[in-house]
Amino acid sequence: MAETTRSAKLTIDGKEYDLPILTATAGPDVIDIRKLYADVGVFTYDPGFTSTASCDSTITFIDGEEGLLMHRGYPIDQLAEKSHFLEVCYLLLYGDLPSTTQLEDFEDRVTAHTMLHEQMHFLFRGFRRDSHPMAIMVGMVGALSAFYHDSLDINDPWQREVATIRMIAKMPTIAAMAYKYTVGQPFVYPRNDLDYASNFLRMCFAVPTADYEVNPILSRAMDRIFTLHADHEQNASTSTVRLASSSGANPFASIAAGIVCLWGPAHGGANQACLEMLKEIGTPDRIPEYIKRAKDKNDPFRLMGFGHRVYKNFDPRAKVMKQSADEVLELLGIEDNPTLQVAKELEKQALEDDYFVSKKLFPNVDFYSGIILEAMGFPTSMFTPIFAVSRTVGWISQWKEMIADPQLKIGRPRQLYKGAELRDYVDIENR
């Protein structure tokens, strides 16, 4: 718990109350209102919880004004440039960067758990072939609790550890199988000799009739997408995981709840919405028309993939993602892909437009990740499942931190009731 050094005074009906102020390592201090209702008899009102700290955490910090995102104190641009996804997973889970021996052990444990129980393959057949991959992932991740009974006890530290490794290892396999199922191709099993990102790409794009060699540029870009989306503090899906698990729900069910929340277009669907916008624009010559619409306050159209709700300056993840986007587009070429042609020209025109520059509406990580995934050959329906693969480690890290917190209580938000006052029941013949 953060240190208490000051207090705030609240005056209600002439009576004064002292509220402790808890000091943060970074970012705003917070007013402790846990005893407010017991002492004063009132609640606070904060729709969307945008001004409420729901927990204290040591995992991730965001400074939207400065464009800073750091995991355990390390800035995201350094991690994305110098590290790789499984090392970042270790950092998020255990608090420090691993030694060579620790990293090798962690990678070996993840690799050993990438396969799914064979009987789970039959569950895929229960879905329609035109199901959205996210619908399949929700069901399959929740179903893990029906197959792995030895890692459901949240009060057993070892079972929590086993569940952690299993979810990080199996999520790419589930996502790849969901994709294969929807395109009517046979499942591709994971391989122990490939790294995390390369394994995922192979499970998505390999077929039994031909060899598939993963291009290292594509693998590196995929690894960066995973790294840059690994955790993002107390966002909607993370808060959902914390709330669901506060009831004592098993870890697989709690992560499934997070996937449900991520599926919402206002959360995990941003890069999909960006690509759909690019396809709506259609050709580069129509870009000025859409930029004009974006500037018109009376037009509901907005340029997706520009600006960010949290980052008021620039998205620190975007610079690294742009580098990968440029590498991928150079490798694969964009001459035959009109969507990617539109993306490159829109980026150029927006960055040169005084309106967007003055309002700091720079391309964000969703803009560039969508471009990369489109270039790799993923349909837009797979963008959010890939996001879920990335974010799993963040959800689990937050879940583990919460379960180990001695202050853990079941989540129970309050409300401002504005309905009918107390009234008596009226028999139906008298209504």
Image (spheres, rainbow, N blue to C red):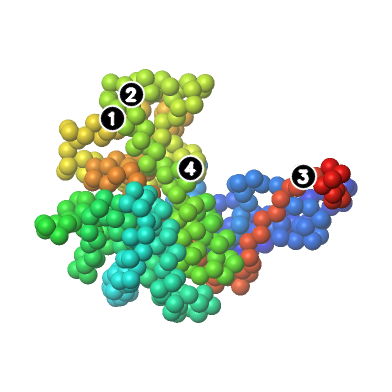
Label 2 vs label 4, nearer the camera = 4
- Give the secondary structure at mark 4: loop
Query: Percent position (x, y) of residue 79?
Result: 34, 56
Q: Is there CB contact under 8 Å for labels 1 and 2?
A: yes
Q: Looking at the image, which is closer to me, 116 or 74?
A: 116
Q: Earlier in the sequence, mark 3 or mark 2?
A: 2
Q: Is residue 60 above or below residue 65?
A: below
Label 3 vs label 4, nearer the camera = 3
The residue indicated by pointer 4 is 266
The residue indicated by pointer 2 is 287
- Give the secondary structure at mark 1: helix
- Dot 2 amino acid type: Ile
- Give the secondary structure at mark 2: helix
The residue indicated by pointer 1 is 342
Q: CA distance from mark 3 to mark 2?
A: 48 Å
Q: Residue at x 21, y 34 (%)?
A: 337
Label 3 CA crowd tier, 10 Å (few <14, some 14–19, many 20+): few
Q: Is residue 14 above or below residue 124?
A: above
Query: Percent position (x, y) of residue 109?
Result: 32, 74
Q: CA distance from mark 3 to mark 4?
A: 29 Å
Q: Residue furthest front?
A: 429
Q: Looking at the image, which is closer to me, 370 or 347?
A: 370
Q: Looking at the image, which is closer to me, 146 or 161?
A: 146
Q: Which circle marks residue 419 in the picture?
A: 3
Q: Earlier in the sequence, mark 3 or mark 1?
A: 1
Q: Earlier in the sequence, mark 1 or mark 2?
A: 2
Q: Earlier in the sequence, mark 4 or mark 1?
A: 4
Q: CA distance from mark 2 to mark 4?
A: 24 Å
Q: Earlier in the sequence, mark 3 or mark 4?
A: 4
Q: Residue at x 75, y 47 (%)?
A: 417
Q: Quadrant of the N terminus?
A: bottom right
Label 3 vs label 1, nearer the camera = 3
